[in-house]
Image (spheres, rainbow, N blue to C red):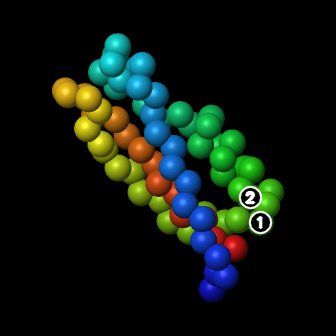
Amino acid sequence: MYQEYKVEIVTEGGCGTLLLGSSGLPIKRLEAKLNEAASEGWQLVFQVIEKKRFWLFWTRETVIITLGR
């Protein structure tokens, strides 16, 4: 059982979405956030990928991660 939880949000870039239609999730930024949290004692509990509308015609993905310790 975890004593406390923390939620982090990582979103793909807007420029790539506008220019290319899709840019993909920033894996390096996601890894950096997870490694930083792990060094502070946090563990990944749950993650979900959400697609949100971006401006008028585009959508972009967001990873919502829940950490616990």
Circle 2 residues within 10 Å: few <14, some 14–19, many ≥20: some
Residue 5's disc is: none
Residue at position x 37%, y 40% in the image: 61
- Which residue is at the far right? 39
Quarter of the image holding residue 58? top left
Residue at position x 62%, y 35% in the image: 28
What kind of residue is marked 2?
Ala
| Label 1 with label 2: CB-CB less than 8 Å | yes
Q: How many marks?
A: 2
- Which residue is at the far front? 55
Q: Which residue is mark 2?
A: 38
Residue at position x 31%, y 44% in the image: 51
Residue at position x 35%, y 49% in the image: 50
Q: Position of residue 46 (x, y in %)?
A: 50, 65
Residue 41's disc is: 1
Q: Position of residue 54 (x, y in %)?
A: 29, 33
In three-dimensional space, the C-alpha distance between marks 1 and 2, rounded to whole angstroms, equals: 5 Å
Q: Position of residue 34 (x, y in %)?
A: 66, 51
Looking at the picture, does residue 3 appear above or below residue 14? below
Looking at the picture, does residue 19 appear above or below residue 55? above
